[in-house]
Amino acid sequence: MRKILATSGLVYANGPLHLGHILEQIQTDIWVRFQKLQGNDCIYICGDDAHGTPIMISAQKQNITPLQLITEMKESHEKDSAGFLIDFDNYYTTHSEENRELTNLIYQRLQENNDIETKVINQAFDDDAKMFLPDRYIKGTCPRCKSPDQNGDNCEICGATYSTTDLIDPISIISGKPPVQKSSEHYFFRLDKYASFLKTWGKKSLQPEIINKLNEWFEQGLKSWDISRDAPYFGFEIPDKPGKYFYVWLDAPIGYIASSKNLSLRTNINFDEYWQPNSTAELYHFVGKDIIYFHALFWPAILEGANFRKPTAVFTHGYLTVNGQKMSKSRGTFILAQDYLKHLSPEYFRYYLAAKLSPGIDDIDLNFDDFIKRNNSDLVGKVVNIASRSAGFINKTFNGMLADKLDAPELFAEGIKLAEKIRASYEARNYSSAVRSIMQLADLTNQYIDEKKPWGLAKENPNNRGIQNICTMGINMYRLLIIFLKPILPLLATNSEEFLQVPPLAWEDHKTPILQHKINEFKPLMQRIDPKSIELILA
């Protein structure tokens, strides 16, 4: 049994979840559910990233305290995630005593390691707001590719990272005026010391596309990373440094450790087994490609310097686009999680993403015409239809009792044969490959039922035992499909287990059919998507 800890990127506590957030959580949740289905000891943690100037300013605009804001957001995020059937073992917050203690400890170890240096730097300062401006509160032209309207720390067009002082024609998004330059002493982490370590670690822990990106950064040369911010700031104050705060991106990933610590304090989980340098547990981070710079460079380097274990791997995914375009409020395609849940089952979205997700970092497009067709065709027309067709005869004529043998053992054997391919696809996060294999099995099953035509036999003799044999075969194939789909469709699996009158299905159950077994009366397990539901979501 493997011991695994998996995380999704922490959600910024500045607004409600949208479908892009949910993509990452679903990708992680499917993988975690698959591991648990296999019998592995797999923990899934996540939480809110609750610090930074944007939190402070957003709270001021709403005339509430930052603490009130992050408390409300955490409740909202947990509710939305639960709505999409995301099964966290712990959902925590970076604004916690566990995180404060761990951040201070890591900073202390980095100091002792001579990894911290001080520099007097010039920063963008908004004279009207009387505050230093965080990177994302400055917009301007990228110094490398000259694209306009880019962030103060990185370009979304060419991927360059830079200092806000390098930005061309910078503007404060608070006052709309050009910021002035003001000097301040800051604390820096010596990232350059860890270049050799990062190259070695990255080769075995990152996807090929990300390794290529890191090589570009290595060629440019790694620079010391500013880990401090000036007051006013909502976050953890640096010990013995009044008016200086830890930059949110220092304590945010430490939140993974803090969430684990919090879980260990509430359960029998051994914290040290997951985070000490000699840990034999596996640690995986699922993140979007927009934050790979932090997770593939800063985070493993800090863990190395502070004597904590490093991630086994960081799995990076692409963005979610809608109908081929970036999510946009003006186009009506910026879809909040709660707006989707008002009109559609979460399992349609889970299945659609699974059918498209691969181990790479390509963007995933939510095309609503395809979304309707794929769900209606695959889930309702192929999978659930097998149960509906078969159960009708078993319930009506044979009192819900399955036959004592399989009518087509070679078809069941094909399912067992495909199981290993499906298992390997799930393990590699190649969910689209797993879905193709599962639908291949569904097609073979429907083809079998179409060829046997139990409805034709029923017209001649409703009590023909051949009907029971055929439909028993159909029910067993449906059960196989549900075992394979369980990581993606947990609600359908639970309802199917009740229909089949079986305990919660495990992966190993695919090897053994159910015979001479009584099933419950069939009730509709999934409805077709009405296009009007999509119109309501996009309204």
Image (spheres, rainbow, N blue to C red):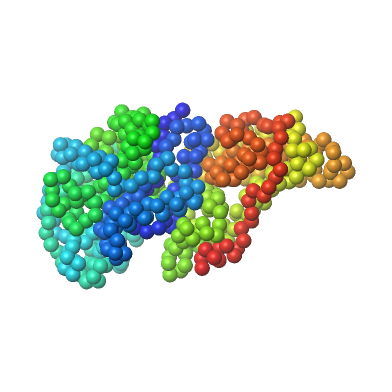
**x and y percentages locating residue 372 in the rendered image:** 59, 58
Q: Is residue 225 left or right of residue 469?
A: left
Which residue is most to the right?
460
**Residue found at x 77% / y 38%:** 399
Which residue lies at the image location 49% right of the left edge and 35% below the top edge? 36
Asked if 145 appears above or below 256 in the picture, the reply is below
Q: Does residue 308 show up?
A: yes
Q: Is residue 347 left or right of residue 334?
A: right
* Number of on-image labels: 0
Q: On the image, which quarter does residue 516 sit in? A: top right
Where residue 429 appears, as percent x and y from the top left, is 48, 42
For this rendering, which residue is in front, 434 or 352?
352
Position of residue 422 relative to residue 19, above or below, is above
Q: Position of residue 15 (x, y in %)?
A: 37, 59
Residue 160 appears in the picture as rendered: no
Rendering coords of residue 59 (x, y %): 29, 61
Residue under the point 23% across and 70% down: 175
Could you tell whether 306 is left or right of 414 in the image? left
Q: Quadrant of residue 13?
A: bottom left
Residue drawn at point x = 45 percent, y = 53 percent? 80
Q: Nearer the viewer, residue 8 or 198?
A: 8
Residue 177 vertical position relative to residue 413 in the rendered view, above or below: below
Q: Is residue 341 above or below residue 299?
A: below
